[in-house]
Image (cartoon, rainbow, N blue to C red):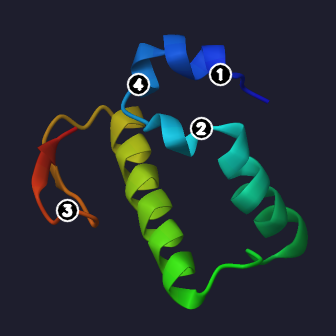
Amino acid sequence: MLGKDYFANNSYLRFIPSEMTKDTLRESIRNPLFHQGEIPDFDIYDQIDVFNKYYDLLIKIILKVLDYTGKYVSLLTHEPTNT
């Protein structure tokens, strides 16, 4: 597993918000989702919010890996941003 230092010092993925790399988030969302197939104690609106945030982040990561340098209209803000 990648530690906090990796994300703090890695300029390539520096755009990833720190709250998406914290251990508490991993414990509350990632582990139950991967191991049980569901996110406990989240209503449908919270689940949709988490999905949208991670979907938006995934698109940004893919564009970064592909060296895309244009603009991306975020699912969250509906505003164009540089990638």
Residue on which the image places disc 4 = 14
Q: Residues within 10 Å of mark 2 (few under 14, many from 20)?
A: some
Q: CA distance from mark 4 to mark 3?
A: 19 Å
Q: Label 2, on which residue?
A: 21
Pointer 3: what residue?
77
Tell me the CA gap for discs 1 and 3: 27 Å
Q: How far from the left and from the top, in percent, is residue 58?
A: 46, 52
- Could you tell me residue 2's position as x and y percent? 72, 26
Q: Secondary structure at mark 2?
A: loop
Q: Residues within 10 Å of mark 1 (few under 14, many from 20)?
A: few
Disc 4 and disc 3 in contact, CB within 8 angstroms: no
Q: Please state if 49 lies on the left or on the right of 40 as rendered.
A: left
- 23 displayed left or right of 69: right
At 77% across and 68% down in the image, what residue appears?
Answer: 33
Looking at the rendered structure, the secondary structure element under dot 3 is loop
Q: Write down the residue under mark 1.
A: 4
> Is 43 rendered above or below residue 49?
below
Could you tell me if the residues under marks 2 and 1 are in contact, i.e. CB atoms within 8 Å? Answer: yes
**In the image, residue 7 lies at what x, y percent?**
56, 22
**Helix, strand or loop status at disc 4:** loop
Q: Earlier in the sequence, mark 3 or mark 2?
A: 2
- Give the mark nearest the N terminus, 2 or 4: 4
Residue type at numbered disc 2: Thr
Name the amino acid type tagged 4.
Arg
Q: Residue at x 57, y 78 (%)?
A: 47
Q: Quadrant of the N terminus?
A: top right
Q: Name which of mark 4 and mark 3 comes first in the sequence.
A: 4
Instruction: Give the class, few, some or many, for how many residues have Cα within 10 Å of label 4's Cα (few <14, many ≥20).
Output: few
